[in-house]
Structure formats: C-alpha cells, structure tokens
Image (spheres, grey):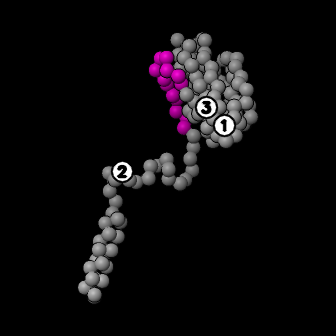
Amino acid sequence: MHRLTMVGLACLVLAVVAGCGSDKNDSSSTPAAAKPGPQTAPTTTAEAATGAIVEVSMKDIKFVPEKISVKVGQKIEWTNDDAVAHNVTATDGADFASDTINGGGTYSYTPTKAGVIQYVCTIHSGQNGEIRVTK
C-alpha cells in the first residue's frame, strides 16, 4: 500500500511540474482580448472591397470601427450590438439620421458623393464616427 501511495504522489508531482512551464506556441492560452484589464475600442480604419457592405457595430457606447473608408455607392450598415438604444446622425458632409435603433437593430446608408462624413449617436455624448468616401 505504501508503494501505491508513493507512485500516486510521484504522478501528481509530475503533473504539477508539467503544467507550470511556459510554451509560447501553446494554442490553449487565453487570447489577449479575453484577458482582464482595461479595454479600449479599436480606432482603426476599415476599408472594404468595392461593392461589399461595410459593417459598423455599435458596441460599448462606441462605433466600431470609428473610422471607415468606402466608395461612392457602397452601402454602410450599422448594427446595434449593445443592450441600450443608439442612433446614427450625420453632422457634416451628408444629411442622414436614423430612428432610434434598439439592440439587434440595423440602419444603412449609401453615400452618393465623395468626401468626409462626420456622424454621431445623439443619445450618447462622445460616440462619434467618420466615413471617408472616395470615387
């Protein structure tokens, strides 16, 4: 019985030691986005292929991405991925305004001329976006 206990203890020690090492190629590690800590919304510019719908998420009281580039005639679609209501309202460079968009709802707009369009959510101060429209 003493020998069986020693074998079990040896297996336990080996299992603990094997789990303590670090393997940089370990695919089971938690992705950086899922690790706790401060998170900020991406501020990258999204560029879509001609003809593709450009998607913008309303998430965590932000437009994600905040800046996009599209071609004239290319459809932009905003989706509310928050539990709170949002809207999409042009402040410069175009004239559009959505109704209130509840969670899961969408709004779309297709620019008809080149230029820069600034837009906001009028419900949430500081929720801003930009669309660069090219020919």
Tell which circle, 2 or 1, labels the residue nearer the N-terminal end.
Answer: 2
Could you tell me which residue is drawn at 67 percent across and 17 percent down? 94
Dot 2 amino acid type: Ser
Could you tell whether 9 is left or right of 49 in the image?
A: left
Which region is colored magenta? Answer: 42-54
Q: Quadrant of residue 112?
A: top right
Q: Which label sits on residue 79?
A: 3
Q: CA distance from mark 2 to mark 3?
A: 31 Å
Magenta-colored stretch includes residue 110: no
Q: Which label sits on residue 103?
A: 1
Could you tell me which residue is drawn at 31 percent across and 66 percent down? 18
Vertical comparison of 22 with 63: above or below: below
Q: Secondary structure at mark 3?
A: strand
Could you tell me which residue is drawn at 50 percent across and 50 percent down? 34
Is residue 14 in view? yes
Tell which circle, 2 or 3, labels the residue nearer the N-terminal end.
Answer: 2
Q: Could you say which is closer to the camera, residue 101 or residue 26?
A: 101
- The residue sitting at the front extreme is 1
Q: Secondary structure at mark 2?
A: loop
Question: Number of labelled discs?
Answer: 3
- The residue sitting at the left extreme is 3
Dot 1 amino acid type: Gly
Labels 2 and 1 touching (C-beta < 8 A): no
Could you tell whether 34 is left or right of 89 in the image?
A: left
Could you tell whether 42 is left or right of 129 in the image?
A: left
Q: CA distance from mark 1 to mark 3?
A: 8 Å
Dot 3 amino acid type: Thr
Q: Secondary structure at mark 1?
A: loop
Q: Residues within 10 Å of mark 1 (few under 14, many from 20)?
A: some
| Residue 28, image x, y percentages | 38, 53
What residue is pinned by disc 2?
A: 27
